[in-house]
Amino acid sequence: MWLKLAPNWVHHKWVIQPSERTLIRYGLILHPIGNNMTFMDTAEIRSKLGAELRAARARRGYSQEKLAALSGISRNAIVRFESGERSIDVVRLFALAEALRVNPGDLLDAAQRGD
């Protein structure tokens, strides 16, 4: 899956839209479920994406140090991303995904599903 950028017409900022079913806006992910919407707050987003990043790293058998070397992102930043302490910006998400040889959209989708 490829990431698509969609404009936030209210504030004219760009937001990540990982799939047709999900929209990240105002620090919340909106999930359509039937006719209802559920919400994840930013702490939950960071936590789930961090857990998926950690799982992807483990599947490759990489240490945090090896991932840092391959991605050009410091080990300390990776520790903070994986713990959910810090948000991952789009540029770093792409760098980490490339180092892990996964699609960044797949990381977001897995985090959304809670895999």
Image (cartoon, helix red, strand yellow):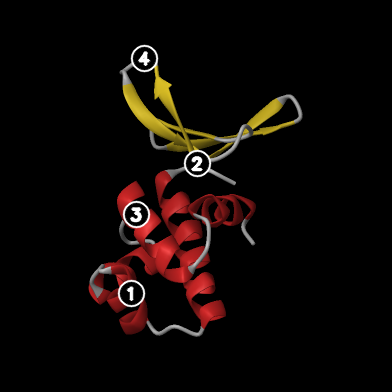
Q: Real-space Cα distance between discs 4 and 2?
A: 21 Å
Q: Real-space Cα distance between discs 4 and 1?
A: 38 Å
> x, y (%) of residue 21?
63, 34
Q: Real-space Cα distance between discs 3 and 1?
A: 17 Å
> x, y (%) of residue 55?
53, 72
Q: Which residue is mark 3?
A: 88
Say if 1 sits above or below 77 in the image.
above
Q: In the image, what residue occupies the spot 38% across and 68% down?
A: 83
Name the N-terminal-most of marks 3 and 1.
Answer: 1
Q: Which residue is mark 2?
A: 3
Q: Which residue is mark 1?
A: 70
Q: Which residue is mark 4?
A: 10
Occupied quadrant, residue 25: top left
Crowding at dot 1, Cα within 10 Å, few <14 / some 14-19 / many 20+, comes out as some
Q: Is residue 6 left or right of residue 22?
A: left
Q: In the image, what residue occupies the spot 40% across and 69% down?
A: 99
Q: Real-space Cα distance between discs 3 and 2?
A: 15 Å
> Which secondary structure lies at badge 4?
loop
Q: In what quadrant of the picture does the C terminus appear?
A: bottom right
